[in-house]
Amino acid sequence: MGRFEKKDDDEYEYPFEHLDKGQVVQEKRVFNDTQIHPRKCSFVISEFLYLLARGDTFTKTEATDVFFAATKLFQSKDIPLRRMTYLLLKEFSTISQDAIIVTSSLIKDMSHKIELYRANSIRILCKIIDASSLPQLERHFKQSIVEKDPHVSSAALVSSIHLLRVAPDTVKRWANEVQEAISNKSNMVQYHALALLHRIKQHDRLAVTKLVSSLIRGSLRSPYAQCYLIRCAVEVIEETNTEDRTFYDYIESCLRNRNEMVAYEAARSICSLKNASLKELTSAVGILQLFLSSSKPTLRFAAVRTLNKLAQTNPLAVVPCNLDMENLISDSNRSIATLAITTLLKIGNESNVERLIKQISNFLGDINDEFKIVVVESITMLSVKFPKKFKHLIIFLNKILRDEGSLQLKQTTLDAILNVVNHIPESKEIALNELCDFIEDCEYPDLSVQILHLLGQEGPLTSSPSKYIRYIYNRISLDSGTIRAAAVTSIAKFGLLYEPMRQKVVILIQRCLLDEDDEVRDRATLYLRLFKEDNIKLLGRILLDDVHVPMLNLQRSLETYLESPAAEPFDISKVSTVIEAHSPVLGDKGSSKPSSTANTPKAMSLAGSDKPAAATGQSAQEAYAAQLAAISNFATYGKLLKSSELVELTETETEYVVSCVKHVFQEHLVFQFNVTNTLNDQLLENVYVKMVPSNSKLVKYEFHLLIESLPYGEPHSCYVSVRIPPGAYPTLSFTNMLKFKVREVDPSTGEPDEGGFDEQYNIEDLEVVPKDYMLRAVCPNFQEEWKRLPEDIQSIQTFGLVSIKNIDDAIKEIIKTLSMAPCEKSEVAQPKANKHILYLSGRFVNGTAVLTRARMKIDGSGQSVDVELTVKSEDEIINEFVSSAFA
């Protein structure tokens, strides 16, 4: 064989590049050969694994055939082939039927003398077995956890972490063996043992505190385990809020650890502490500053990213790193350079803004759109901080707008320019001039329409309105119908707001009467008639006034008007301003409001306020959105995506009545606790709810807002805010404790006594479930939409509704659990029916349309209803998530 040259590599074709699933499925027959050929079988297994990694899907029948064909390879004693067989079985075990049949072979391998067999058999078993069969294998798992071989022990520990979700009570009985595994010499075994032990005890705060206290004395040598212990220590600090500095001192001591990973984790943890003082941050920032000059890109990136986050909350602590971060602007890794420049923008002063912007411009072409968006967002904050530098900022933003880029980048940049214009009136004219040049060569119609709207609103109010008309009229001559219609409206606004130009505007609008687009002609005809009739008041209402009725109500009223033979003109004043008790129409992305006003909370007062945030003329969602927006702590959270129905956490006749509403934002969950004091001889002060999550890894506590004073009979609200990862929709439960200070009140005078004492009151647990992320949305053409959505990623689940004995109750239970809207009148079953099909539709909070079909029939015993639930959308993860509501 000749020597392999570099040029040969260029001509080399990847062997799996044109792989066909059907052909590979047929190749599984090599697994059935009497004489097993290890190399041939391994190659076929590689093909199957490649198909799975590529995203190909297998039906249950195909997956089952492949799975059981592969089990015949257990006869081979070839170790590399056995290793590949384990990988294939592990991947196909979750999608094939009756995979549990292979359990006996895997149990046999668990006690094999070859460690590879034992470790891999454990990994597959944890994918196959359920809660009922785990007790039979308990002895094998316990032995594997304390096994001397690190591969076997690690496999058993990681598998136990997965099994904890399946059978928590069984796995919790293995705590002694897991504790023993922590003393193993292997780094990974220590790490996995600590992770499992923490998960076993995570719901017991005292047990977690004792665990961390026992391990911070130095019994851990694994850097991975030390990093995990640091995170546990941070969790204890944030949960207990004590003045004991034992855990903080441990974290600070880890800053001096010889392992860079441990030192960084300690520094990152200190920077993330809510109440860390500037003095405490100094030592952590010092370590991060050293990492900024490291030769390792990963360390530089980790350090600058942490400092970037810290600069948002405590910029003074980051100032000592200025010089080091300026050196990183020229870093070859553009991710590091971007983070460095955005950090400098957050902590910079007015004198060096121009220099920083110039440095950004030099490397802007070398980074992708995602990082450019980060830079633009930092520039937006800078405009608020240093308003005198608006000219440099707008020129810089306009450069990004003109360069090639995605719609998301250009939309973010345009929003930044509009933000500058709104905050700094002096910047209006320079911004409009730059935007006029931009629309001459804009490839995105949506952006052109927005800019034309802005020109119509602000252009007539500038010192020289006439210069903008040419740019706007060019769009009528050169652009598409949508843009031409927006341009006609923009020109009409100039005639309305700037009277000296009114005659010229009329002439320009007359030229649009013969436009080929209906919308353009209709707008031109309307504006021209109003101008000629000198009906400026009505024209002003049409062009400048916002519609003060919900668009969904207006749409329905117009449809009703068109269907009826009404002789009188349509009167918009008769359209209801209250959101009607119907679900929004699927496909209307702008409609994401709850289906009814019936869930308006009993107590909607702001914390510390005497006035309730009533919802007259508003839906409950609108009232909640307005109420939360009025609280400065939530002003930056963005749009309110969903507010749940009211959840009662106490009985109505108890001393303190508590209910809760769950509010979902893009990256936060806000819990609004409505509290009423029913005791006339007590005044409650500093009232708040302490929430402990069932899984603290899914959410991160941010802050709570308390009720300063809660007198008898007056409902008030306190809040708890937790952060969730972007794009994540966690489901978990919270244990809750109402905490407050009690002051006795003299009933005769109504005056509270001096002093008082601290008290706490147990309230019900609160769950965040899939329906909290689902909005009701009616689908007018359910069957057509159902056929359109892909079947290969749909989720199908069968289950029984125990103790429900008739179809009507089953329908109500499914609708309540999923919080979706019934379609095609399927919520009504035939009298005394023993089977039925229910169709539901909704919209997930991220905008994804979801359809559900529930086939149900009464069980033969008549004591339950069997249900087959099929969930369809364009997102497989959402399908599984919605199905999990009945898990």
Image (spheres, rainbow, N blue to C red):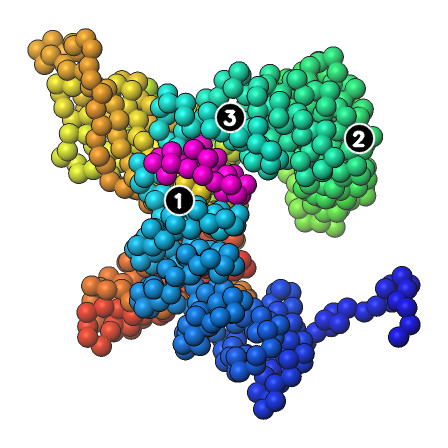
Q: Is residue 443 visible?
A: yes
User: Is residue 826 within the magenta segment?
Assistant: no
**Residue 274 vertical position relative to residue 514 in the rendered view, above or below:** above
Contact (Cβ within 8 Å) of mark 2 with mark 3: no
Label 2: which residue? 330
Dot 3 amino acid type:
Glu
Q: CA distance from mark 2 to mark 1?
A: 43 Å
Where residue 66 appears, x then y in whole percent?
54, 79
In the rendered view, does 717 fall on the left or right side of 677?
A: right
Query: Secondary structure beneath disc 1?
Result: helix
Mark 2–mark 3 distance (CA, rounded to whole Å): 32 Å
Residue visible at 44% across and 55% down in the picture = 157
Residue drawn at 49 percent across, 51 percent down: 189
Relative vertical location of residue 341 with respect to residue 683 in this rendering, above or below: below
Dot placed on the residue nearer the N-terminal end, 2 or 3: 3
Q: Earlier in the sequence, mark 2 or mark 1?
A: 1
Residue type at mark 2? Ser
Q: Give the extent of the magenta segment.
A: 209-234
Q: Position of residue 104 (x, y in %)?
A: 40, 76
Apparent side of residue 736 relative to residue 434 in the rendered image (left or right): left
